[in-house]
Image (cartoon, coloured by chain):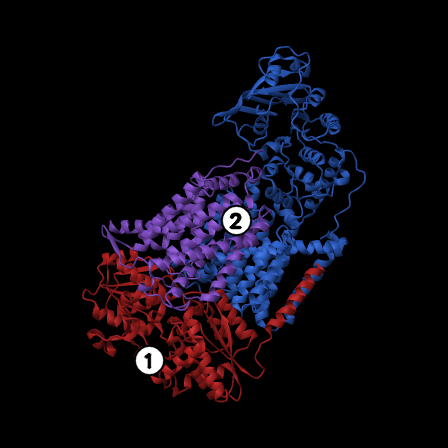
Amino acid sequence: MKLCRSLAAALAALALACSVSLAGAQDIKIGYNSDQSGGGAAEHGLSGRFGVEAAIEDINKAGGLLGRKVVLVNRDDTGQPPKSIQNMNELIDSEKVVAVIGPTNSGNALAWLHLPQQKKVPVISHVATATEITKRYEKEAKNYIFRVSMVDREQVALLAAYAVKASKTKKIALIADSTGYGQGGVKDATEILKLHGVTPVANEKFQPKDTDMTSQLAKIRTSGADVLIVYALADANANLMKSMEKVNFFPVTVGSWANLATPFVNIAGKKLAENLIFAASVTETSNERAKALNARILAKEKNLPIFVCAAQGYDSMTILAAAIKKAGSTDGEKIRDALEAVDGVQGIIKTYNKPFSKTDHEGLGVADFRLAKWKDGRVVDFEDAIAKSLTPADLKK
Amino acid sequence: MSRDAHLYAFPAAALALLALPFFIANEFYLKVMFLVGVYYLAAAGFNVLVGYAGQKSLGHAGLYAAGAYTAALLTAKLGWNPWVAFVAAGIVAGAFGIVIALPSLRVKGPSLAMVTIGFGIVMEKIATEWTEVFGGQAGIHSVKPLSLGTAPFAMRDWVLFVVVLGLIAHLLMRSLLSGKYGRAFLAVHTAEVAAESVGVSVYRFKVLAFIVSAVTCGLAGALVAQQNQYINSDFITFGLSIFFLLVVLFGGGGSIYGPLLGAIVLTMLDAFLARWPHLQHFVYGALLLFALYAMPDGLAGAMRALGRRLLPKLYERPPVPTAVAEWQLQRSEQLHKEAPLLEAKGLYKAYGGVVPTNDVSIVIKTGHVHSLIGPNGAGKTTLLNILSGIVPPDRGTIGFNGVDTTELVSNQICRLGIGRTFQNLKLFADMTVLDNVLLGLHPHMDVGFWPCMLGLRSASRQEREARDEALRILDFLGLLDRANEIAGDLPYGVQRRLEMARALATHPKLLLLDEPAAGLNPQETHELIGVIARIRDKGITVLLIEHHMDLVMAISDHVIVLDYGAKIAEGAPAQVQADPRVIAAYLGAETEEPAAAPLPRPAVA
Amino acid sequence: MEAILQAVLSGLALGGVYALVALGFNITNNTTKTLNFGQGEFLVAGAFIGVTLVLVLSGKGHTGVLQPEDVTIVKYLTGLAAILVVLSVLGVFLYYTAVRPFVGAAGLAWVMSTIGFGIIVQNTALGIWGPAPLAIPSPLGNEVIRIAGAGVLPQEILIFVVSIVVMVALDLVLRKTKIGKAVRAVAHNKNAAALMGINVPAIVILAFVVSSCLAGLGGLLIAPVTTASVFMGLVLALKAFSAAIIGGLDNPRGCILGGFLLGLIESLIGLWHAELREISIFVLIIVVLVFKPEGLLGRKIAEKV
C-alpha cells in the first residue's frame, strides 16, 4: 500500500512537471483545439493552424497585444469528441487561455460548446461549419461562440438555389455521410429546399470511410432525381464520383467546400473531379494578400493542403486580436462584447465591417461564397447560365 | 495484503483520497482525477471477468455504452431523476452483460475474442445508426447531471462522488474475491473440468462474472454521460474496449489493486501526454509491447514481488497450526452398508467408429472398494467420465443414491455426492494447497453472493469453519505442513495426494479415483493402500481405475474388468484373477501354457 | 438485377483481400497459436510502401501526387518487391519482439503486444506520411469494365485473380512440397517436428514472414480501390479476423472461404440497407460461433480428460 502511494506521489510530481507551460506569465494565451492527425478533417486542422500561427507572428511583430506577447497553445483532438472535450477542459481550466480557436469537426464542437459558454471564454470556429454551433446559445444574454468559416446554412443556401434552378424534373436527391457534419447538412438542405417548395425524392447515407456507394446511387437513380446534393468530406466525395462512373449515372452534382481539399482530385482523378460543383470562398489566387499568405506558409511548412482554412484561421485570429485591443483587457466577457462591436478589420478573405452583432455571429455569409469546380487539376470559378441567373432572392435560407 | 495491514491502510487511504480534491484548485486536474475514478470503477468489475474468471472480453465498450445511453435517454428524453437513472444504468448494463455472456459461454480463445468484439461493434453501430433513438453522431444533449439539492455537481463534487464509489467498489470486490467466489472464479479460469468436478457451475460463474463487469462498466459510462451532460456514438469505440483490457492487464489481473494501479497510470498518461499526441500513441504502443514482457503479472504483480522482499510482514499468509483435530466426515444422511449406491444400466457411448463404452452395467455397493481394470483403451476413463457427468452417455441410465443422474452435469453430480480425481492431474496450479482443498469444500459452503460481497458475519464465519476443516483434511492425508505452498510447485506424488484431498473435501459418498498410483514409486504405492483403506473407513465408497495389480489385489472388495468397452468379468479379486477371459484380454487369445498366476501387463509408469 | 451483379463483383474483390489477410492469420495461428492483432497496420504499411516506391520511381517526393500515367505495371511490381522485402523484415521483427516472449505464457499477453506493435507501426507511418490518404491510380487503368450492365474496375478483377492465384499457390506448397509438409508438421506438434529434424524456429519465422507479406500484398492490391490511409487498417483487419473465425481459424481453406463469404455478404447487405452492413455481419458472426464455435470448416478439439 505504501508503495502504491509513493507511486501516486511520483506520478503527481510528473504531472505537475508536465503542466508547467512553456509560456511566460505575462503572455496572452490563445488556445487551438482541432483535429490535426485523426483522419478526415486533419488537413483542415493543420492548414487552419498554419494560418493562425502566421497571424500571431504578424501580431507579435507589430508589438503584440496590450503590450504582451501572444502565444498559441496547441491541442490535437484527433477528431474524437472525448479528446476534444478533455482538451477544452485543459485549455480553459489549466492553461487559462483567453480564447479558443477551433475545432475542425462539427461533432466535436457540439460536444463541448457548453464549456466555454459556461466558463465565459470566447470561441471562434475557424473551420467547423455546422449551423447549430453559433445558434445554440443565440437566445442567451451573451453568446460566446463565433465563427469565421463557411457556415453550412449559407453554403446550402447557395447549393440549393443552384440545384432547384438546374433541375429539369424538380426531383432532387440528397446523399451524405453519417457524421454530424453530413447529417447536419442534410437537415439544412431539407429545410431550405422546402422554402423552395421542393421535397427531396431520396435521402441516402454512407459511412465516412466507405468507398463503394453504388447501391445508394442505384436507389437514387430509381427515384428519378436528376440533381444530387452531397454533403461529406473530400475522400468520400471522390469515392462517390468513382461509384458514379461504375454505375454510369451522372446527375448534376453539387457539394460543400470540403471538395476544395486535394484528396478529392487526387482520389477521383482529374477527369472525374470535374463533375462536381461546389461552394468555395477564397482561393490562393483570389487576391494579393491570399497569394502572399500562401507563399509565406509554403515557404515555412512546405505543404498547405487547404488554403481556405489557413485564410479563415488567419482572419479569426486577426479579428480576435482586434477585439482584445478594443476591449483593452483579457477578460472573457469584455472580449466577447468587443467581438460584437469590432469593425473595419482587414483580413485575407475580405475587410470585415462589423462582422458580428448580437444576433449574427457569422463572419462570412453567402455573399462571400461562390461556386467553383476542379478543372484540369486546379480550382476555378464556375459560372454557367444558371449560376449567373441566381439572384439574392433565390438564396433562401 | 494481509487483513491487519489492510485494516489500518484502508481508512488512511480513504481519508487521504477524500481530502485530496479540496487541495486541488485546477479544474482540469480534478477532471483527470474524476476520469481515474471512472476507469477504476470500470476496471474493478472488469477485473473479475478478465483477471479472475479469465474471460478476455474485447467488447466491453458496448456495456459502457449501455450504461451511458440509459442514463442519457432516461434523463434527457424521459425526464427521470438523475440518481434513479444512474442506478438504472447499472441495472440495464447488467442485463446486457447477460446478453454478451450467453454466446460467450460456448467459445474460448480467439473465438471468444471474436464474439466479444462483435458484441462491442454491434452496440457501437446501433448507437451510430439508430439515430431516431440514440442520436447517432449528433448525440444526446441535456443529459442531467447528478445534483444534491438544486445545484448540479461541480467538478469537485463529481470527484468526491467517484472517490466514494471507488472506495465502496474496492471493499465490495475485496470481500467478494477473497473468499469462496474469488476461488471459484480462479478455478473457472485455470481448469474448467476440475472446477465442475468440485461443484462449481462454470456456466453460472461465467455469467456472474459478465454481469459484475457489465454493471461497473455501465456505471462508468453513466458517470461520463452525466458529467459531460452529453454522449454520442464517438465515445464508444473499439479503442475503449482495448483500453479497459489494458488497464486490467497492465495493472495486474487477478489482483485487487491491479485495476487501481492501471487506472491511475494509464489515465494520467492519457491526460498529460495529450499535448504530444504522437508521443502519447507511441507510449501506448510501447507500453503494450514491453510492459507485459517486463511485468507479466502487471504493475500489481511487480509491486507485490517487490513488497514481499521489502516488507514481508505485509504479505504474510495466516500461519498454519502444527496440529489439528482429526477430520470427521459429517453426513446429513446415513447410508446403509452393502446397499447399492450406484447402479448403471446399459451405458453406451460411441465416438464415430470407436465405442469405448458398449452396453456396460455395474453396481457399486456402499462401503466397498471397487476396482476397474482392463487393458489400455478398454474404456475405463470414459466410464468414469460418464459416471461423473463430464460426458453424457448415448444410451443407458445411471441411478445414484436413488436419483437418476443420467442427464445431470458435473457440478450437479458432485453436489449429489460423487467426487473424483483425474488421470492427467487437474490441480489449480497457481493456488495454494489450502485453497485447492477449500475449493473442494465449495459445494458445502452455502453462503450466497450478497453476504459474501457485503462481507457479512455469516460469510466470514463459514470461511473460518471451512478453513479449519480444510486443514484437517490436509492433515488426514499428511499434507498439513504444505498448506501454504503453491500447488504447482509440489512434487508429483504430493500433487496426486492433493487432488485426492480436494476430492475428499466435497464430502463424497462415492469417490472415483483415476489411476491414483500412476507415477508413484513402489513405496508410495504401498502407502496408497493404507490411504484408500482409511478413506473407506470414513464411510466413503471408492471406485478406482488402476493398472498396479498388487494395489488392486490388496485393497479391492470387488473388481470389474473391461475390454474393448464391454464388461467381461467381475467379482472378488481372486476370482477375477483366475478368469480365463481376463487372462486372454491381458495376454492375448492364444496362449500355449495356462499360467498359474497370470502376470498383469506392466503398469504404465 | 445488375445492381446485384455489381454487388457480387465488388464483394468478391473485397473478399479476396479479406481472404489474403485471413490466410495470414491462419498461418501464424497454426504454427504458434498466436496471431498478429496489428495485421491491419501491416496492410497499411504495405500500401504506403508500394505507393511511395512508385512515387519515387516517378521522380516525385514521398507525399507527391500520382497521375494515372505514372503508375505502370513495372513500377507497381517493383513496389510489390519492395513491400515483400520490408514486410518480411517487419514480420521477423514482430516475431522477436511481440510474439516469441509471450508464446505459451498464460493469458493473452501476445494480443496486447501485437496490438502495441501495430500502434507503433501506425504512428511511424503517421509521422512519415501524415494523416492524409494517399491516392494511387490502378496500374491497369481506371476505365470501368461493363459486365452485363454492372461496372467493375480492372483493379477489382486483379484483386480477385491475384488472391485466387496466391491461395492456390500456397495450398499447393503446403500440400506438395517438403517445406509445406514441414510447416504442417510444426502446426500439428512442434516438439515432434523438432525431433524429426525440422528446424522449428526457422519454420515459425517463415510463417510470420509469409503472414506479413500477405498483409502487405493485400494493402497494395486494395490501395487503388479504397485509397491508402493510415487509419484503414483496423477495420479491415477486424473483418479479416472475423472471416477467419467464421471459416475456421485452423483451416486455411476455411479462412479463404470465410474471406470471400464475408466480402459477398457485406456487399449484398450493403445493397439492401447500407447502414446495417456491419451490424448484420457481426451478428451473423456471433450466431455462427454459438452454433459452431470452431468455425464452419474448423475442427472440433476435444480436451483429453
- Tell me which residue sits at (66%, 39%) in the image: B439
Residue at label 2? Answer: C205
Q: Residue furthest left?
A: A168
Is residue B452 placed above or below A74 in the rendered structure? above
Rendered shade, chain B: blue
> Residue C258 vs residue B591: left or right?
left
Is residue B259 placed above or below B21 in the rendered structure? above
Element under label 2?
Answer: helix
Residue at label 1? Answer: A285
Q: Are marks 2 and 1 on the same chain?
A: no
10 Å crowding of disc 1: few (<14), some (14-19), many (20+): some
Location of residue B295 (image quadrant): bottom right
**Residue B86: percent from left, percent from top:** 53, 58
Element under label 1?
Answer: loop
Depth check: give the residue in front, C51 or A332. Answer: C51
Depth check: give the residue in front, B445 or C147. Answer: C147
> Residue B305 vs residue A207: left or right?
right
Location of residue B244 (image quadrant): bottom right
Residue type at mark 1: give it. Thr
Rendered shade, chain A: red
Rendered shade, chain C: purple
